[in-house]
Amino acid sequence: MFIRLTSQFRKAYKKMPKTVKMKAEEKEKVFQKNPFDARLDTHKLHGKYKDYWAFTVIGQYRIMLAFSGAKFVDFINVGTHEIYK
C-alpha cells in the first residue's frame, strides 16, 4: 500500500506540535501493516465527509484519509476535530 500526501495534509502537518508529529510517524507504521488495527481506532466519517475515513494519532488529533483502490491511500488532512469543519 502506498500513502500519498495531499498539499493540504503537508501544510497542516508542518503546523503540528513535535510530539504529535512523532506519534503520527509511529501510527503511520501501524497503519502500513494494518489500516484497521485497534490501536488506530480507524472509523468511517459521516455527512459531507462520508467518502473519507480517519484514525486517531493522539488525543484529539486525527488523520483524515481516503482509500483509492487496493494500492493507494491518500492522507487528506491532519489535526484536531477542527479539520471536519
Image (cartoon, rainbow, N blue to C red):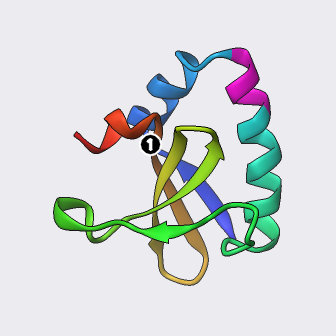
- Rendering quarter of residue 30: bottom right
- Highlighted range, magenta: 18-22
Secondary element under disc 1, as helix, strand or loop, is: loop
Based on the displayed image, in which of its 4 quarters is residue 20 positioned?
Answer: top right
At which x and y percent is residue 57?
A: 65, 44
Which is nearer the eye, 75 or 69?
75
**Disc 1: which residue:** 6
Q: Nearer the viewer, residue 25 or 80?
A: 80
Q: Residue sitting at 82 percent across and 55 percent down? A: 29
Main SS, magenta region, reads helix
Q: Residues within 10 Å of mark 1 (few under 14, many from 20)?
A: few
Q: Amino acid at mark 1?
A: Thr
Q: Which residue occupies the foreground of this view, 4 or 80? A: 80
Residue 33, located in which quarter of the rendered image? bottom right
Q: Residue at x 70, y 28 (%)?
A: 21
Q: Is residue 61 magenta?
A: no
Name the one closer to the observer, 52 or 45: 45
- Figure check: 13 above or below 77: above
User: Relative to 77, is 40 on the left or the right?
Assistant: right
Q: How many numbered marks appear?
A: 1
Picture residue at 18% right of the left edge, 65% below the top: 47
Q: Looking at the rendering, in which quadrant would you find the C terminus?
A: top left
In the rendered image, residue 42, in percent from the top left (x then y), is placed at 58, 67
Residue drawn 46% across and 26% down? 12
